[in-house]
Image (cartoon, helix red, strand yellow):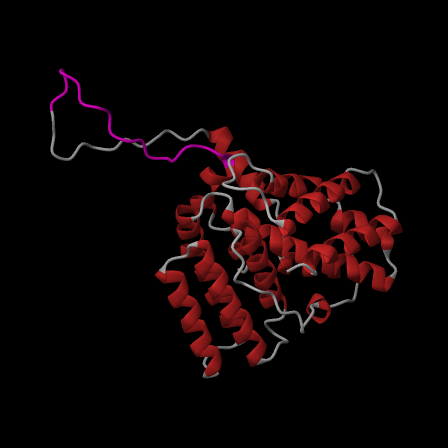
Amino acid sequence: MVQKLFVGSLLGFMVACSGGDTPIEEPKAETKTEAKTDAPAKQMKKLDLAELQKAAEEVALVPSPAEMQKSLKNAGLSSDLAALVDANRKIEMTVADKDNLAVRTGVILADLVLTVKTSSKESKLARLESLKAGFKGLGAGDDIQATIADLGTQITNDAINEDDLLKEMDELSGVMVSELEYEAGEWVVPLIQAGSWLEGANLVSAAIVKENKFEVAGQLLKQPRVVEYFLKYVEREGRNKAPDQVVTKLTTVLNDLKKIAEKDTMSADDVKQINSSTSDVLSML
């Protein structure tokens, strides 16, 4: 249900994830042997099956915060990730760097989903407003803004329960992916995912340290492919300008986490480093 909001709509996202061209080709130029028409037909590009499969695997490998919570329970930890979310954290959403803004939006999205059944009305509304500001700054259109505004109205009027709120947020993904990719570029949704995953990894590592159950760290935090996936977009070629300090720090942290995730086993010190490194990035938001 909620997972789609983090991995995006597969159909709309898989070509962008693979770095392929747009699926629709431009009309061919007119030649002497071709008859001119008022409305030349566009030809659909034949999509490569292997390319689509690879893209689908990349999208599916990123765990949502809700999945992280489930994995935590399955590993025998009793901590509730919602209780570990910093309720007093205020994330500024007026930053100019869009990579930075996308990461911030992902963190807020994770916190909203994880705490939707435990947080106050005021907290939900505040996070929705931050989401609205984040999406607007990333180039989201009127559909996303209207959907978020409607959710805020329903929460204010006590006209929606937590389960229905999650369903409504799920529907938001249908317009979020296509609009953001068109306005900002194919990198924006993966960086929103990166923010959500960053928050989740921080909370999971905190739970492991809190309960002193380092033996389960491998199954919960050993995800080198996820880190590589995010690095591909953070370090992408063709950025309009040099990354700001948050994105630079995130890049350093992701490279450090990649080295840890590639180890055969994770030690207690490795888990503590993951928690410390992700906390360093989150403290800059």
The structure residue drawn at horizontal position 75% and vertical position 49%, both measured from the top left corner, is 221
Image quadrant holding the C terminus, namely bottom right
Give the x, y percent position of residue 179.
40, 52
**Viewer-closest of 240 and 123:** 240
Q: Quadrant of residue 136?
A: bottom left
Residue lying at the far top in this picture: please name it: 33
Give the x, y percent position of residue 222.
75, 45
User: Looking at the image, can residue 105 be seen?
Assistant: yes
Question: The magenta stretch spans which residues?
Answer: 18-35
The structure residue drawn at horizontal position 60% and vertical position 65%, both measured from the top left corner, is 91
Give the x, y percent position of residue 258.
73, 40
Name the main secondary structure of what is drawn in magenta.
Answer: loop
- The question of residue 259 being in magenta is answered with no
> In the rendered view, does 183 fall on the left or right side of 170?
left
- The question of residue 30 being in magenta is answered with yes
Q: How many dots with numbers?
A: 0
